[in-house]
Image (cartoon, coloured by chain):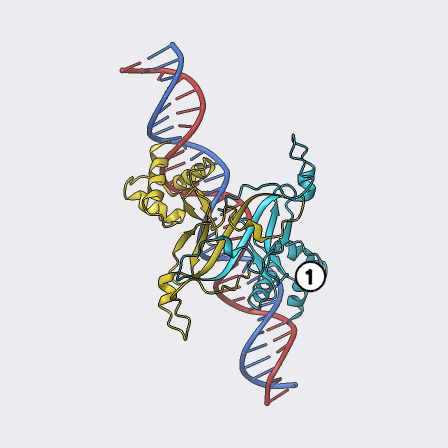
Chain colours: A yellow, B cyan, C blue, D red
Amino acid sequence: MTRQRRLVYDVLLRDLDHPTASEVFLRAKDQLAGISLATVYNCLETLTEAGLVKQVNLDREPSRYCPNLNEHAHFFCMGCGAVEDVAPASRDGGLQGWCIPSGSRVEKMEVAMRGLCRRCAAGEEHSVETAASGASAPDRSAN
Amino acid sequence: MTRQRRLVYDVLLRDLDHPTASEVFLRAKDQLAGISLATVYNCLETLTEAGLVKQVNLDREPSRYCPNLNEHAHFFCMGCGAVEDVAPASRDGGLQGWCIPSGSRVEKMEVAMRGLCRRCAAGEEHSVETAASGASAPDRSAN
DNA sequence: CAGAAATCAAGAATTATTCTAAATCAAAAA
DNA sequence: TTTTTGATTTAGAATAATTCTTGATTTCTG
């Protein structure tokens, strides 16, 4: 654990907002002026390989990084761009919702949701969809 | 629906193996020598916007394309690289497995699994994990 | 068929990320 | 403390997938 790795990790732990590598770089520079973007990429890769950090991807957007090691999915708000962690409801985190072909082994599952966060959904007073209570029925067109 | 779009779409329908844009390009060239990679990208984008095709991403790998319009997840075999569609078991496709923050609206969910397909799992006679029956308990470390 | 609009092809441009090579650093050995 | 050794950092070049630009071509519409 070098100084740069420590710093990159601390940046991720400070705000749990799933920054991109460039965002991590900008924040890290404030505390260690000489750090380079390549080093940030190196550190993020090292931390990811070490299992301290998870790389989070949605579509072809730049990768984001997340120090939450608990099992979780990610929610991407189409309104404000925020990314939130989503906890599993059941012990198996939705895997039983799918017909896994018999004989195959699932090593890991990645779940990403797109939609509007509470604040953005509330700001949309379109007709009846005021989203006051729980999540409304989603489209569920899983890729 | 131009000739090029029709061809790209036909290529996707012929083998349902989730080719990348480059692979689509190679297959399309056999039937329409003059087609360009840029056109293949254009057509794939147009077809995707039209809702006839879905773009499938895993990590930072090149996008793949899928003409299956039914709700489904994707299984990526780490052994042979094949991509399979995975049908939902329940009507809601695993969404109820997650604690959606109240007030937020989920518009769509993308589910990707990594593991070994039946053939690759069977080829691994490591100790006891012969994967004879159903899928063994996965790691479920959803990103 | 004329004119307008859409689409195509070729290659340049973009962008996130990775690679390279030289410089720096840190721990262990002397 | 100096030297050695190997890993790490840095800056910039390189890469790869994708997008953009431009002019040519095709396709509609009348």
- Can you tell which quarter of the image residue B65 is in? bottom right
Q: Residue at x 67, y 35 (%)?
A: B130
Neighbours of disc 1 within 10 Å: few (<14), some (14-19), many (20+): some
**In the image, is residue A83 above or below residue C22?**
below
Q: Element under label 1?
A: helix
Residue type highlighted by circle 1 = Leu
Q: Residue at x 44, y 54 (%)?
A: B99
Q: Is residue A128 left or right of residue B1?
A: left
Where is residue B140? Give x, y as percent. 53, 44
Q: Which residue is mark 1?
A: B13
Name the subunit of mark 1: B
Q: Is residue D30 left or right of residue A20?
A: right
Where is residue B94? Give x, y as percent. 54, 55
Where is residue D20? Give x, y as percent. 48, 63
Q: Residue at x 36, y 66 (%)?
A: A122
Where is residue A106? Give x, y as percent. 59, 44
